[in-house]
Each structure stands twice: as C-alpha cells, then as structure tokens.
Image: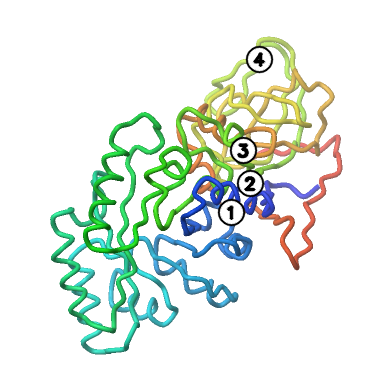
Amino acid sequence: MKPGPWARIDLDALRANLAICRRAAPTSRIWAVIKANAYGHDLSACAAALADADGLAVARVQEAPGLRGIGIDRPILVLEGAMDDAELSIAIATRLELVVHAAWQAELIQAHLDRNPQPGSVRVWIKVDTGMGRLGLLPAQVEAMLGRLRRLGSALELAGLMTHLANADDPLHPMTAQQCEQARALADRFGLPLSVGNSAGILAHPAARTDWARPGIMLYGGSPLLDQTAADLGLKPVMTLASQLIAVRELPRGATVGYGSTYRCPEAMPVGVVAIGYGDGYPRHAPTGTPVLVRGQRAPLIGRVSMDMISVDLRAVPEAVAGDPVTLWGQGLPVEEVAAHVGTINYELLCRLSPRVRHVHVHQPGIVAQEPTHPAMHTHEAGA
C-alpha cells in the first residue's frame, strides 16, 4: 500500500467541458482560465490539454513564463496585469497580453516604452469596473485612459475592453444585464472587442457571450450557477480526489472518535481511517456527516479532521477493509455537494490541495499514466 491521497485528472473531461463552452457561446473566442495552478488541476498539463482554446488566461505574470518553455505558443492573458518593471519585461519577452486596470499600470508601461521603444511590444486589455467594485477603471475614466495609451503609438496595441460580472451565478440577478449593457456601450463607443462572460455568464446570460469569453470553473467540471449542478449542465468532473482506508476499527458503543472527542459511537460499529487530512488540503472544518465514497458507496465523515487522517462511519459498508479506495470528491460525488457540507464553494476545495497530493493525469496524448494501485491490507493501522 502506498499511503496518501492522489488526484486523478481526467483531461478528456477537461476537453469535453471546453466543447460545452464552445456550444454555449459559439461566436465567442475563448480565453481558457488556468490561474491558480489550473484551479488545482496542474497548470502545465491542463494548458497542453486545452489546445482548442483560442488563448489561456492566468492571474499573475509569474504563472505564465513556464508555459512558453513547454511549447505553449497561444496567446496568454495576465488578468491582474504587470505589477512592476521586472514583470513587464518578462511579459514582453514572453509575449503576454496584459490587463490594465489602473492609471499606475499605464504609467509603468509608458516609462518602460520610453526606455525601450519596440513596435507592437505590448498588447493590453483595459479593464472597466461596471459593478464588481474590485479592479478596473470607472466607466468615466475609460476615454482618458484610451487617449493616454493610444499616444504611445505603435509600441502598444489595444486588444480590447473587459469587465467582470459580480452576480452571474444567480441567473435572475438584474445586475448582470446592467453590467453587460454598460460594457457593450463602452466597447461600441470606442470600437473595441469586448470580453465579459465568465463561466456563469457564458451559461446563463446571452448578453455576456461577447467577442471573448473567459471560462474558468466550468472547464474543471464545477457548476458556476447557484441553482444548477454540474451534472444538470452536462459538465464532467475533471478531478477525482481519492485516497484509501489505512485502518478499519471495530469500536464499542460509547467510544469517542478524534480530537476533542466530538463524536461518540451510538452503537458498536466499524470505523474507517482514511489517509487524508487538512495537511493535504482537505478542509479541517468539514463536519460530521460530510460524505465520502468507500468502495463506491456513501459513508459519512465522523469526528474532527486531523492533519493526515479522517475517520468515517462504515456501518453502510461493513465489508470494507484496509486498502479499499475512498473518493473525497469527483466521479460519483460532486465537489459542490462536499462544498455545501463544508460551507464553502467548489472553487476553494479544488484550489486548496497541498503539494503532497499526487496528480495522476489520464488520457493525455503522448503520456501513459497509471493510477496508483492499493492492494487490500487487512492488519495495518496507523497512529499519530
């Protein structure tokens, strides 16, 4: 037995979810968002698998240069833009497109180009705040920014205008239509391509299906909508987080389980110990009752999550033995369901895995990957 969790990354599912995005927004070009290590799914593998996307988008400059080193030649957009001259130099050298969301970024670009004038060396998107209240110019500031950037001449290319939707996960929220209308009016006024739709916008708001769309969570098989599951939307989970039982205990009625003794066995019962914990990124605050799958059957977590282990109630799976596989989320157990028990969102669970979780990529052209094998082990127990 090789103890410890692994994340099975189904790259065919990733490509299938991109195809759903294409069908939902057939006239849009696609920035496939792979920030935060591709939402925890492995940046390089997902970037290579998303060959049908028109471009890739990351949050920060430091996420992007390595992609050029593995042969990714498509456009790459940096959603937060360059933070200083060193990042700007890297962006120019590696042909990254940059978002400009504040006057100081325009000043940074201007100062750099004054020292290093190169035709077409910087391609930028202007971000406008239409209601998110986070990054972006106010609509009234866009015209002045455009004038400033256009005065830089041939060294800078204006790629377009973008905004970010604040409430697109709620299909009935009126603010989304207002944001789309305002962004469209600005883009038409200044003759610029427009990028609005995130995953929720693409699926639920036709006005957000603009020249460029920016899908994120939907690519990885997570639902972006409050009232629909990923299965409802035809999305396939890309990550299945799995581990195995490392012990099966027969505990008597009244025995307590875990730190703080927060769970007391209501009867004599089998309790399984699973090799995963908050040190792997499984949420420490997951409550008793959070579901896992043991041998494909549901079993509830009991007691507190430890750094390296969780305990589960095996009364519904009495045949379980040490070495049996356990699914924490993914195929057969939607990550949204686990997130609801934990009181968070699917994005956070996918992004928070620690480096000690092994990634196993399947169905990637040119790569033959095998999942770890975990033969049953009947007598092994662990303590810490």
User: Hey, what amino acid is under mark 1?
Assistant: His
Q: Identify the residue under disc 2.
A: 239
Precedes in sequence: disc 4 or disc 1: 1
Q: Identify the residue under disc 1.
A: 41
Task: Look at the numbered disc 2 and give the secondary structure of its residue.
Answer: strand
User: Hey, what amino acid is under mark 4?
Assistant: Cys
Indicate left or right for 34 with 96 as reference. Answer: right
Do the residues under discs 1 and 2 have CB atoms within 8 angstroms? Answer: yes
Cα distance in 3D space between marks 3 and 4: 40 Å
Name the image quarter holding residue 106: bottom left
Q: Identify the residue under disc 3.
A: 234
Mark count = 4
Residue at 66% x, 51% y is 9
Q: Position of residue 150 (x, y in %)?
A: 21, 75
Indicate left or right for 80 with 341 as reference. Answer: left
Precedes in sequence: disc 2 or disc 3: 3
Indicate left or right for 197 with 327 as reference. Answer: left
